[in-house]
Image (tube, helix red, strand yellow):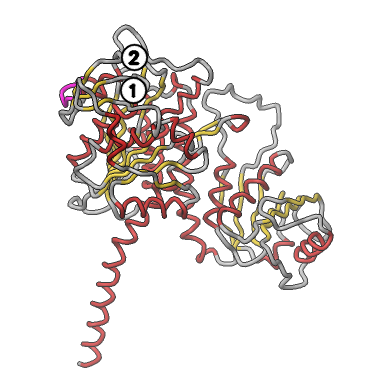
Amino acid sequence: MDVELGALRFDTAATRRTPALLVLVADGFQAAGDDALSAWIGKALASGDFKTEAGRLTTSFGAPALAAERLVLAGIGDGHPARVRKAVAAGVAALRASAADAVTVCFAQQPQAVHAATLALLEAGYSYQTTKSRPDPKKKTPSLKSAVIGVPSVAAARADFERALGTAHGVALAREWANRPPNHATPTLLAGAARQLAKRPGIDCQVLGPKEVAKLGMGAFQAVAQGSGEELRFIVLRYTGAGKSAAPVALVGKGITFDSGGISIKPAADMDQMKFDMGGAASVLGVFRALADLKPALNVVGLIPACENMPDGRAVKPGDVVSSLSGQTIEILNTDAEGRLVLCDALTYAERFKPRAVIDIATLTGACVVALGEVRSGLFAADEALGQALQAAGERALDPCWRMPLDDEYAEGLKTNFADVANVAGRYGGAITAAKFLQRFAKAYPWAHLDIAGTAWKQGANKGATGRPVGLLVEYLLALAADAAAPQAGAKAKTKGRAARRAASA
């Protein structure tokens, strides 16, 4: 769906010719004038047919005195961005069944949460098509193709709109690659997607194959990949928005393009969903897509260890011991705990960039789904400031996470008689013990881990990737860039002030 920002005052919205007009109405609505739209909303509220509870709708076709063919009133409650997002999603869903091919969205009160409205429109406009047969051109299928968000001042809303647009493009790319079937999203194809991103200004890409990875000594990563006929790929993306001397943020995305569990094979039921096990990698691609649009003044590195986890005769076995890039040896007690094995080598590789912070993103544990469900991602942070910044970014981005503990006692279960560390501990606290395993390889820099096993995709009728946590990560990076720019702006202002005073005294 194409989304634009347009100039539109609410008191003139009744005269706008559009296939559909979606009006967002907050609690306490009071007509500011005697225009037809205000009168219509007032009557709908007075009759009880419409309530401003978030997501509640009232629809009409050919409403008197309105130029729009269809009118949809959507409640946004107190106007919080989360309620706006819910209302827009509900309104678009209602219009999908109509013949409307375009919609104008406006706020009944002062425009609120333009960012959230834009995200909701673009999210609703995404539709997976890559492996579907082409639709019959003779069959007309109703579909919204464009939207305009009407605001009194385009200039005042432009920054929020552009930020949402860049983020949404990143979310869409992450959803697309996570949704693709495993034979259409192999490690080689994933590397191709990264190379495509490198065609955009400011982004560079390097792809390492099996020989380069072996030469580096990434034994844990190699162990996971050795049971598959698909070759591994180690993808290194770099976004340069600041000076070369500025320390980057490193994002490390788990890229298991299909996870059978290996020798510790998974049950057949729902194993198809293991194509989503590269959701962390997809989110890194999505963040870089957003960076290309938004161009923040900071440096970012993306590391994606990509491979399949398969159970052929060459596959790693429970009880095998492998050597990681860090030099630490690992006893593999469960081959289905493979994500931490590919990540640990990538975390060690990240040291060479001397990063200011490293965040790994992974569909890592079913235990995190049990703990937090499908609402919040699990956040583990060894650095307090980094943990707080990520949690705050998630709240702002409507992509929330929840801080989990990292007490040293949780690592006791990872002890083994046959290596430096085992790759799994006992049954309890599995999301935490997985994080404690990763922490061993991330001591050289501020580090955080996002377990997105419950949030990277949806099941049921809406089955598919969500694109999370692209929104959280983009918000975090933009905040870092803004914080860095603030002192520089203050210094420039002081310099100008001194110059002005000198000129005045002269």
Most common secondary structure along the magenta stretch: helix
**What residue lies at 70% left-to-right and 44% top-to-bottom?**
95
Residues in magenta, as a range: 211-217
Q: Is residue 135 magenta?
A: no
Quadrant, the C terminus: bottom left
What amino acid type is highlighted by mark number 1?
A: Cys
Q: Is residue 212 magenta?
A: yes
**Badge 2 local density, few (<14 within 10 Å), some, or many (20+)?**
some
The answer to whether marks 1 and 2 mark residues whose Cβ atoms lie closer than 8 Å is yes
Can residue 212 be seen by looking at this rendering? no
* Residue at disc 2, secondary structure: loop
Q: Is residue 219 above or below residue 148?
A: above
What amino acid type is highlighted by mark number 2?
A: Ser
Q: Is residue 48 above or below residue 125?
A: below
Can residue 311 be seen by looking at this rendering? yes
Judged left or right of residue 176, residue 486 is left
Tell me the CA gap for discs 1 and 2. 8 Å
**Residue 283, x across and y down, in percent:** 40, 38
Q: Is residue 59 above or below residue 485?
A: above
Judged left or right of residue 344, residue 278 is right
**Residue 395, x across and y down, in percent:** 47, 53
Closer to us: 74 or 69: 74
**Residue 303, x across and y down, in percent:** 29, 36
* Label 2 sits on residue: 228
Check residue 307 in the rendering and tell me which mark sits there, or answer none.
Answer: 1
**What residue lies at 66% left-to-right and 27% top-to-bottom?**
137
**Residue 212, x across and y down, in percent:** 19, 24
Closer to us: 170 or 449: 449
**What residue lies at 40% left-to-right and 49% top-to-bottom?**
474
Quadrant, the N terminus: top right
